[in-house]
Image: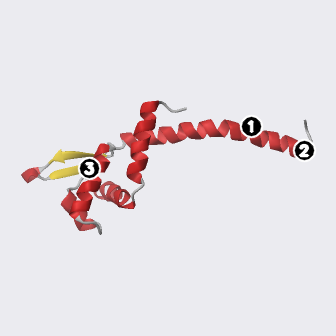
Amino acid sequence: MPQPDIEATAEQVFAALADPSRRAILAALASGGPATATDLAGRLPITRQAIAKHLALLADAGLVTAEPGERRRVRYRLRSAPMQVAQQFLAALARDWDSPLGALKDHLDEQARGTP
């Protein structure tokens, strides 16, 4: 089973990704590079205030970092590390499931063939 710190990070990532607005913000950052909340509000059908709240949650999950920019404007940049941790969590879960499911399939195949 996955380690507790991996599980906690994965939980934050999954919670952050559960919201379609946050996924849209991440997609916009992925395609357009670092941006301010104002820049993102210009590209997405979401208010600047809502984007700021979503960016705070994404930052808490470690999916974006805030970088000071010119004229006190904060630019947000994607971070892939938490997403990689979530992928490791899912891979570990899949491994934990694959073995028992494979054994069950083998057992059912043997039963279907009439092999003890």
Q: Please name the amino acid that badge 3 sits on.
A: Ala
Could you tell me residue 5's position as x and y percent? 42, 32
Task: Say which label, 1 or 2, has the lower sequence index.
Answer: 1
* Residue underneath mark 3: 56
* Residue underneath mark 2: 113
The quadrant of the picture occupied by the C terminus is top right
The residue closer to the viewer here, 15 or 109, is 15
Q: Please name the amino acid that badge 2 sits on.
A: Arg
As drawn, is 77 to the left or to the right of 110?
A: left
As drawn, is 63 to the left or to the right of 97?
A: left
Asked where in the image residue 36 lies, by quadrant, the reply is bottom left
**Residue that extends furthest to the top in the rendered view of this protein:** 3
* Residue underneath mark 1: 103
Q: Residues within 10 Å of mark 3 (few under 14, many from 20)?
A: some
Could you tell me residue 23's position as x and y percent? 38, 57
C-alpha separation, residue under disc 1 versus residue under disc 3 = 45 Å
Q: Secondary structure at mark 3?
A: helix
C-alpha separation, residue under disc 1 versus residue under disc 2 = 15 Å
Tell me the residue at 30%/49% (across/down): 57
As drawn, is 65 to the left or to the right of 23?
A: left
